[in-house]
Image (cartoon, coloured by chain):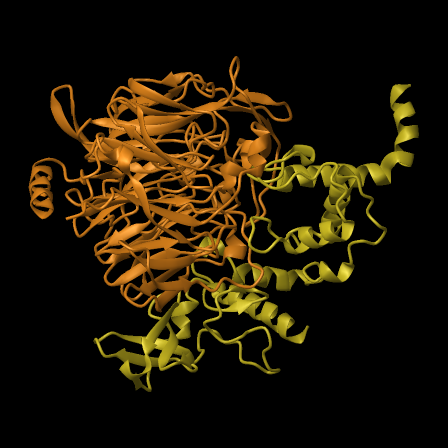
Chain colours: A orange, B yellow
């Protein structure tokens, strides 16, 4: 019976855009379209209150928390920890099948860490980026290392890989951190089976390439442009979409006058060659560290009576941009936060108006804060409700710009900041259900502390996410009403997933407080300095029906 | 009148004040940044420093070497000795401890400073990120790079630095059971698995294959000349100068 309903469901889904997951969770964003939406509907609004924990897995690597998105394939769940320990677990029972611990150099540390946000799986291998900027492939059955590549010396570049790679056909695509360092960013593709380098897309064009003239003098050499989160992919258009982060120095822009391509842009690349098909720059000459770095959600929708293939990107500045994903053409833009003053708005061409730039040597009050109008934790899109579910944070800061010269591989901010509450109210956070084309809110769920975990949407019209206090909870996707909650003992900074084994739907969430943004919170919420870290995976399901 | 008054005062204040300002400035641009320490030692993602009366020896060690397993990098080698001294003094000041005289031992920090300018230029070329693939892509020296190729930091006297003619050395052609064939450098064999670098294209790939699955051909057809094609002859000579300096240090 269960099998039959799953089959019918799959048929129904195939009629529309196929962006939902089924029994597995094959990619970082769920499907290639990065919806973080599952077609599983065993757990519903009616029975969600009955969810019980069925197993927990303690990974034992709690320093830095657990920021991962697990991958599930063929009944096996793969989860990486902060220091690049990669576990394979039986998805139904939590039994450990193997663990691979990447051998980090003794005494190793890095500004961008310690954390890891996910892996990719396919071709019988699991692919993981490392804290010291390697990409490694391990055997999916045994956990034995098959190949590893040092992408670039981590000490020299001041960069590494914390985001999940993306597997597209025969290639593993992987980004890089380093947007706050004197470093020049890139996206790399490696042959999945051999690890051989296939192509590199420099996010900052070199001399003689189009766009190099958007950088003053030699500033392109150390201009940041990190690709620290995972791209998505449209198989029909054969384009992969990656977001490029802020230019460096973050706040001091006088030495890099120009629009600074392709920082703060979405780039559409041919995954076979790395060739640029189109780009759209959201923030020319960013001086706020408001990365266009997050996920690209690929969805189809009617715009003025015509179905269009769209791409939606929420950036760190709290703005959403919607573009045509075939051409890059701007379609819509709107804020997801109330407290926003770094720009006045977006015009009909997608250009920013009314820039409010921080000043050299004098504090400038800017909203949102550097942690973002939203952090990197992903939004979800449900094709059933046709709504975008995203978290948002209302907080501000005072930025003081300092003139700074680059030193290769060192942090390169060009300024400092201190967090502030917004005018007239306490800093807080919310999770909203919004129309992806207009930004109009259908409902809003308020949280005392910043919501820093990804959202999961299911065909049971449920949303799952967690908060910094350790609560993992389910909301009604139509109303925002809380239906169920479970205290996991440590805050949420990762991404829950859902999958099914033998017809039973499971919901798995990392629990383990940590991260750079979490570390900023004590400036506004002093008590959060004592929030406990952890590194545990909790898995929930409905109680098994007895025959 | 006023300028004269200033001139009279400044000299007596100068030494302490300059070091203080320099330390504060370095702290502001390298420590109280982004997701790290808060300004003037207030809490950030990294621990608060103000008023904590930290042990100066601990401050020096952590500032120099970093804290393993955390986001705190080591600044030895990135800061000059004078900069390191200034920023450690500043941290001690805001934490409420005094820096003992001569706290920063010169030996930990002066190696880079002692490098002759020509060698420094060679080192810069060796690791030149602008050209994408560089010497450091396949060789590790001074703790940077990938140790696929031979150790270049301790070369024998009379070493032949003709990088373009350079032989294939111990590179051999490996053929795997599945038909894959590539120029390879063997690293080690553990439990009947072979670890070897695949040199088909940079960066080198450290592959692990079952020992029994490899067949070897004597001629690898791999040439070092191709690996150094990003450099001019003059640049290669400068790099040779750096390596000569490293080996005779």
User: Within the image, what quadrant is residue A292 found in?
Assistant: top left
Foreground residue among A171 and A262: A171
Check the image and name the residue furthest to the front: A547
Foreground residue among A127 and B78: A127
Is A330 positioned to the left or the right of B191 in the image? left
Q: Where is residue A450 in the image (x, y as percent from the top left)?
A: 46, 30
From the viewer's perspective, is residue A330 above or below residue B109?
above
Foreground residue among A356 and A69: A69
Q: Position of residue B10 (x, y in %)?
A: 88, 32
Is A360 positioned to the left or the right of A311 in the image? right
From the viewer's perspective, is residue A542 above or below residue B139?
above
Is B213 positioned to the left or the right of A285 in the image? left
Number of callouts in the render? 0
- Residue at left offset 41%, top offset 43%: A204
User: Within the image, what quadrant is residue A382 found in?
Assistant: top left
Specify the quadrant that holds the N terminus of chain A: top left
Q: Where is residue A113 in the image (x, y as percent from the top left)?
A: 50, 48
Q: Can residue B232 be seen in this view?
A: no
- Residue at left offset 60%, top offset 67%: B242
Q: Position of residue B37 (x, y in %)?
A: 62, 39
Is A423 positioned to the left or the right of A2 in the image? right
Q: Can residue A257 be seen in this view?
A: yes
Foreground residue among A279 and A486: A486
User: Within the image, what quadrant is residue A59 found in?
Assistant: bottom left
Check the image and name the residue furthest to the bottom: B218
From the viewer's perspective, is residue A347 above or below residue B128?
above
């Amino acid at each position: 019976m269960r099998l039959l309903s799953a089959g019918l469901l799959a048929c129904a889904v195939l009629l529309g855009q196929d962006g939902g997951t089924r029994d597995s969770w094959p990619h970082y964003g769920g499907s290639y379209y990065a919806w973080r939406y599952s077609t599983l509907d065993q757990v519903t609004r009616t029975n969600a209150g009955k969810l019980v924990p069925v197993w927990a897995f303690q990974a034992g690597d709690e320093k830095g928390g657990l920021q991962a998105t697990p991958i599930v394939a063929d009944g096996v769940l793969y989860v990486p920890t902060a220091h690049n320990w990669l576990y394979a677990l039986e998805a139904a029972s939590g039994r450990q099948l193997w663990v691979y611990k990447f051998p980090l150099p003794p005494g190793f540390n890095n500004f961008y860490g310690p954390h890891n946000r996910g892996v990719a799986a396919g071709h019988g291998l699991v692919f993981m980026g490392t804290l010291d900027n390697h990409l490694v492939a391990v055997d999916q059955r045994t956990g034995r290392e098959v190949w590893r590549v040092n992408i670039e010396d981590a000490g020299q570049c001041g960069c590494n890989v914390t985001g999940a790679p993306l597997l597209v056909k025969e290639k593993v695509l992987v980004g890089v951190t380093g947007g706050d360092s004197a470093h020049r960013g890139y996206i790399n593709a490696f042959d999945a089976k051999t690890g051989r380098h296939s192509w590199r897309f420099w996010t900052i064009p070199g001399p003689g390439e189009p766009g190099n003239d958007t950088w003053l003098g030699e500033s392109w050499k150390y201009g940041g442009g990190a690709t620290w989160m995972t791209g998505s992919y449209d198989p029909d258009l054969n384009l992969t979409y990656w977001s490029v982060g802020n230019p460096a120095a973050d706040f001091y822009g006088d030495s890099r006058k120009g629009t600074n391509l392709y920082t703060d842009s979405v780039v559409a690349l041919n995954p076979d060659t790395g060739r640029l098909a189109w780009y759209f720059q959201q923030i020319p000459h960013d001086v706020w560290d408001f990365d266009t770095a997050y996920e690209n959600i690929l969805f189809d929708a009617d715009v003025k009576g015509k179905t269009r293939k769209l791409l939606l990107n929420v950036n760190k500045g709290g703005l959403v941009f919607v573009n045509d994903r075939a051409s890059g053409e701007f379609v819509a833009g709107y804020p997801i936060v109330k407290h926003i003053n770094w720009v006045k708005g977006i015009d009909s061409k997608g250009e920013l108006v009314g820039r409010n730039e921080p000043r050299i040597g004098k504090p400038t009050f800017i909203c949102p804060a550097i942690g973002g109008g939203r952090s990197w934790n992903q939004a979800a899109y449900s094709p059933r409700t046709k709504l975008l579910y995203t978290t948002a944070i209302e907080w501000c800061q005072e930025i003081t710009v300092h003139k700074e010269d680059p030193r290769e591989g060192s942090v390169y901010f060009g300024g400092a900041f201190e967090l502030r509450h917004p005018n007239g109210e306490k800093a807080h956070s919310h999770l909203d259900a919004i129309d992806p084309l207009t930004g109009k809110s259908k409902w809003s769920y308020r949280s005392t502390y910043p919501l820093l975990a990804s959202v999961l949407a299911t065909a049971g019209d449920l949303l799952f996410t967690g908060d910094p206090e350790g609560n993992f909870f389910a909301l009604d996707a139509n109303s925002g009403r809380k239906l169920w909650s479970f205290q996991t003992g440590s805050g949420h900074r990762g991404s829950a997933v859902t999958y099914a084994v033998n017809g039973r739907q499971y919901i798995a969430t990392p629990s383990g407080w940590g991260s750079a943004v979490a570390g900023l919170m004590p400036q506004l919420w002093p008590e959060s300095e004592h929030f406990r870290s952890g590194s545990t995976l909790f898995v929930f399901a409905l109680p098994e029906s007895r025959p | 009148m006023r300028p004269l008054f200033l001139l009279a005062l400044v000299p007596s204040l100068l030494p302490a004040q300059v070091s203080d300002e320099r330390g504060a400035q370095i702290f502001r641009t390298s420590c109280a940044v982004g997701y790290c320490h808060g300004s003037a030692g207030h809490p950030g993602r990294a621990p608060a420093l103000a008023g904590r009366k930290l042990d100066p020896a601990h401050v020096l060690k952590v500032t120099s070497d970093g804290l393993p397993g955390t986001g705190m990098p080591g600044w030895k080698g990135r800061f000059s000795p004078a900069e390191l001294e200034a920023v450690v003094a500043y941290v001690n000041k805001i934490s409420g401890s005094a820096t003992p005289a001569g706290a920063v031992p010169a030996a930990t920090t002066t190696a880079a400073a002692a490098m002759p300018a020509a060698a420094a230029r060679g080192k810069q070329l060796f690791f030149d990120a602008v050209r994408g693939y560089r010497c450091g892509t396949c060789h590790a020296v001074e703790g940077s790079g990938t140790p696929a190729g031979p150790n270049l930091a301790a070369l024998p006297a009379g070493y032949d630095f003709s990088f373009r003619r350079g032989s294939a050395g111990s590179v051999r052609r490996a053929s795997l059971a599945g038909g894959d064939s590539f120029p390879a450098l063997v690293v080690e064999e553990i439990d009947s698995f072979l670890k070897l670098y695949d040199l088909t294209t940079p960066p080198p790939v450290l592959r692990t294959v079952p020992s029994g699955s490899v067949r070897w051909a004597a001629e690898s057809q791999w040439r070092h000349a191709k690996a150094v094609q990003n450099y001019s002859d003059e640049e290669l000579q400068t790099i040779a100068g750096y390596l000569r300096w490293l080996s005779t240090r």
